[in-house]
Amino acid sequence: MERSYEKYFRQNRLPHLWCPGCGNGIAMKAIVQAIEKKGLSQDNTVIVSGIGCSSRASGYMDFDTLHTAHGRAIPFATGIKLANPDLNVVVITGDGDCTAIGGNHFIHGCRRNIDLTVVLFNNNIYGMTGGQASPMTPLGKKATTAPYGSVDRPFDACHLAEAAGATYVARSTAFHEKHLVDMIADGFDNKGFSFIEALVQCPTAYGRKNKMGSPANMMMWMRDNAVMKAAWDKLPEEKKTGEKFPIGCFYKAEAMDYDTAYDQVIERAGGAAK
Amino acid sequence: MKSEITIKMGRCKGCGICVAFCPKQVLALDELGKVQVANGDACIACGQCELRCPDYAIFVDKGAEA
Ligand SMILES: Cc1ncc(C[n+]2csc(CCOP(=O)(O)OP(=O)(O)O)c2C)c(N)n1
Ligand code: SF4
Ligand SMILES: [Mg+2]
């Protein structure tokens, strides 16, 4: 039986261009399943992406979509949201797109608490351009620009989002597909800046450089190293070792979102001609 | 039949994720490197292959028990 989420894909664009075993396809499916779960309409939802393998997702999704410039998805999304606050605006970005060239846009989007749902497909590398290190390449991991292992300390994008003012922050992985759907769906519920990091495998660039084995092996690595937040919080510090990392919703806060704040400005200025 | 496996061959890239995660060794890659059902009777319709396929190429439905 045809799956109901298929209606959210541009069928004539599939199969997608991602490499065999790339996790981006799983994250893209999770987004449309979250959209379906929350009943967001195709006509009222806009998908905005930057540049990178991950950002190619917008081209496969049957909504109004914008494939923008490298690092600039959040500014485009901000414009859309302010022009028509009734739209659900979803941003798809990569670790390079969001935290390197787009780093400023990201933190200021968080700071302003703009009502966007930003899903970062984190493959720990610049996939599209051939495997250069990104600000989210873990310490010691290899990339074409870090042949002896990265010496740069990585960003934890979830910490960054929280510190910068995002009001919903969560992480999941391509292995935890159903959990990822839930994390994204909960992000839609938040009126404000919602940030979800989706760890995805890039077998071609990151996996090969770091000898992580097949795409399935990379997903088993996620299964074996991701720890649900509730369990993570109970772990003694000395057990938070090796490559273990937490997943789940890390942060939620109530704060005025930018549309509401801007409406107040319009009111103060005497109201807008509707 | 316990389960019905549908494959959209045009979408399969032969990444092997479904083969690796199937708990019953139902699936294999054929000589062209695409997925094939090697042992359909062993399928328990757990849906691991469908859940993990990054290309939406394989689907499992519980069959009408006959
Ligand atoms: C202004 C600009 N600078 C550089 C590039 C080259 N470029 C394209 S994609 C990319 C990195 C993408 O990395 P990431 O955001 O992690 O996406 P991935 O491909 O890993 O999904 C870069 C540097 C560009 N397209 N535009
Ligand atoms: S290079 Fe990596 S991220 Fe890009 S499509 Fe291939 S596997 Fe996916
Ligand atoms: Mg990347």
Image (cartoon, rainbow, N blue to C red):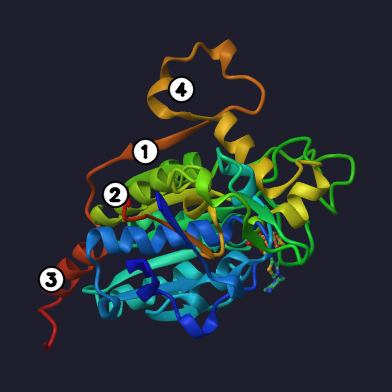
Instruction: Name the amino acid type tagged 4.
Output: Trp
Going from N to C along the chain, the mark reached first, 2 or 1, is: 2
Q: Which mark is residue A186?
A: 2
The chain ID associated with circle 4 is A
Residue occupying the point 36% across, 55% down: B63
Instruction: Name the amino acid type tagged 3.
Output: Arg
Q: Are marks 3 and 4 on the same chain?
A: yes
Q: Is residue A118 visible?
A: no
Q: Position of residue A234 (x, y in %)?
A: 42, 15
**Residue position marked by numbered label 4 in the rendering:** A232
Residues at marks 2 and 1, CA–CA distance in whole angstroms: 9 Å
Depth check, mark 2 against mark 3: the one in front is 2
**Residue position marked by numbered label 1 in the rendering:** A249
- The vertical placement of A73 against A100, above or below, is below
Going from N to C along the chain, the mark reached first, 2 or 4, is: 2
Q: Which mark is residue A268?
A: 3
Residue occupying the point 58% across, 37% down: A222
Give SS at disc 4.
helix
Q: Residues within 10 Å of mark 1 (few under 14, many from 20)?
A: many
Res. A69 image quadrant: bottom right
State yes or no: discs 2 and 4 in contact (Cβ < 8 Å). no
Depth check, mark 3 against mark 4: the one in front is 4
Instruction: Name the amino acid type tagged 2.
Output: Asp
- The vertical placement of A89 against A197, above or below, is below
Give SS at disc 2.
helix
